[in-house]
Amino acid sequence: DLLIENVAGHSGMSIFSKSDSDGAIYFGDVEANNLGQIKYSHGSNAMTFATNDGAASLTLDSGLNATFAGAVTLSSTSPLLYLNNTTSSTGKNWRFSSASNGKFYITHESVIDAVTLDHTTGNATFAGDVTLKTGKALLFDNNGTTYIKESSDGVLDFYGDNVHLVSMKQNGTQSEVIVNEASGDVDFRVEANNNTHAFFVQAEGAGKVGIG
């Protein structure tokens, strides 16, 4: 065993290498002498931690970045992961946490649960608005064929199985609701209390209109 001791102050160990070479500590057994490694590469100014086969599990580079070769696991009854942006004066502190109730939280400034994910229901709850950029869609199936999207400024389109059902327009120059704008086989029907076809427009052909 190696003991480094200085009861009067700090103590340490130094490993000096050539400027383009490595300095390392190896951990081995009777089968291999380098299964575990702590290595500093002077050529790239990076420190690596290796396990089992010598491949780097964790690399700390000269840019203050930490790169993990595998998964990062936080294990406790309520694990937390903090993200602090030191270049911004507002909105810089975010927390990711998993609670004992099985829910996952994305929290701002440790106060507002901006997003709550419930693993038992699959539900996602947002504390504020959900904003989609123009041209992006809100999908309702795995195939991406039933959705709502703002195709252009003030124009909201509804699609079912890739069929353009309804278009709602309000962009300063026009205000209208259009059914079957793509001229597909999409009928339009208005129900009354006791009449399923109080008003009916048949899309086929020239389009027949029925009232009552």
Image: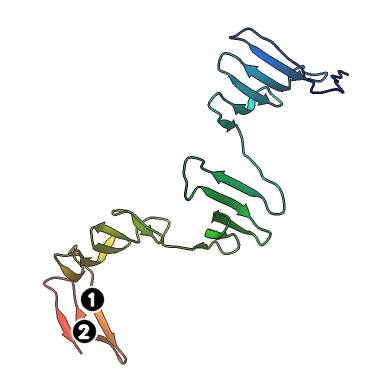
Of the pair 31 and 43, the residue shown nearer to us: 43
Q: Name the image quarter holding residue 148.
A: bottom left
Of the pair 188 and 157, the residue shown nearer to us: 157
Q: Helix, strand or loop at disc 2?
A: strand
User: Which x, y percent locates residue 163?
Assistant: 27, 62
Q: Amino acid at mark 1?
A: Phe
Q: Amino acid at mark 2?
A: Phe
Q: Give me the disc on residue 143.
A: none
Label 2, residues with CA under 10 Å away: few <14, some 14-19, many ≥20: some
Quarter the N terminus occupies: top right
User: Which x, y percent locates residue 75?
Assistant: 70, 47
Instruction: Residue at 60%, 27% (x, y): give it.
Output: 60
Q: Helix, strand or loop at disc 1?
A: strand
Quarter the C terminus occupies: bottom left
Q: Name the image quarter holding residue 187.
A: bottom left
Q: Name the image quarter holding residue 132.
A: bottom left
Give the residue pinned by disc 2.
199
Say whether marks 1 and 2 touch (CB < 8 Å). Answer: yes
Instruction: Residue at 79%, 23% (x, y): give it.
Output: 10
Q: Earlier in the sequence, mark 1 or mark 2?
A: 1
In whole angstroms, how far apart are the C-alphas of marks 1 and 2? 8 Å
Q: Does residue 34 sit above or below 88 in this rendering?
A: above
Instruction: Residue at 53%, 26% (x, y): give it.
Output: 63
Residue at the extreme left: 206
User: Which x, y percent locates residue 47?
Assistant: 63, 22
Give the residue pinned by disc 1.
188
Q: Does residue 206 sit above or below 98 in this rendering?
A: below
User: Which x, y percent locates residue 194?
Assistant: 31, 92
Of the pair 18 and 169, the residue shown nearer to us: 18
Q: Is residue 165 left or right of residue 3?
A: left
